[in-house]
Amino acid sequence: MDQAKRIYDCIVVDDDELDRLVLLSQVRKYPFLRVTGEFESAEEALDYLTANPLPDVLLLDVDMPGMSGLELRNQLLEIPACVFVTSHPEFALEGFESAALDYIVKPLKSDRFARAMERLEQFLSIHSKAELLDFTLGADTLFIKEGVNRVKLNLQDIIYLEALKDYTGIVTRQKKFNVLSPLSNLLKEPGFRNFVRIHRSYAIQKHFVEGISSKGVQINEQLLPVGRSYKRSVDELFLK
């Protein structure tokens, strides 16, 4: 996906309904953010997040009944970005010690929020590219970073590769991963030399092929096209 057009999920947590509505109205001015939840308590947000995918961004008040925004953040440090929006400037140091990207003091002003959003968008773009870039190629394995985890893939389990501009999609039976490396560069690596290029956008592993016809190559219950310049070599390889 083009990083400039990526949309990032966020949640808003504030016990004051009016402040929460003001914050939501500001957030919706920025198309790179999508609000997936709004909550009046940290406990309510935490319950939601235990059963749903984690967002990319937390927008939190600090002083709330029960669990504070700081405590919530410290339980969700795997979420990349957090911006505190609060009436309490005295907690700013603690906020930044909790890996906050920014700390905004109420009343919320559009120009101050705009500066925070500019910084947030830049941070998320860099963070996403860094995650995609973080992969390690072994002799017959590939380790891909996903959040705080590293996923181990056996190269023999990769069904096909798909070119996505500067990225390559790595497709297995369970999941599709993206790494920040053009397909042409990836195919030069020793571990990928068994892959067969059938199109400028696709390279496959021969042992996963289910069939081949004039329409393309059937693989993993999908029909992938064969590029005109690759047709002869594909025919020679699969039909001999």
Image: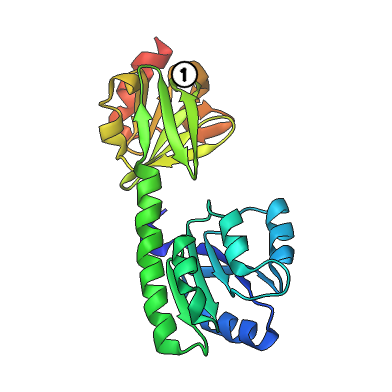
Which residue shows up at 39% across the image and 67% down it? 121
Question: In the rendered image, which quarter contains the C terminus?
Answer: top left
Badge 1 marks a residue whose secondary structure is helix
Give how far across and how far down residue 195 sits, in percent: 37, 22
Query: At label 1, which amino acid type do we have?
Result: Gln
Name the outermost residue toward the top.
Answer: 240
Q: Is residue 49 left or right of residue 119?
A: right
Q: Nearer the viewer, residue 118 or 181?
A: 118
Which residue shows up at 52% across the image and 59% down it? 56
Image height of 199 relative to 21, above or below: above
Q: Is residue 23 left or right of residue 167?
A: right
Give how far across and how far down residue 38 sits, in percent: 67, 72
Residue 137 location, quadrant:
top left
Q: Is residue 154 left or right of residue 227?
A: right
Residue 148: in sight, yes or no? yes
Image height of 163 relative to 71, above or below: above
Q: Nearer the viewer, residue 50 or 235?
A: 50
Q: Nearer the viewer, residue 114 or 78?
A: 78
The residue pinned by badge 1 equals: 156
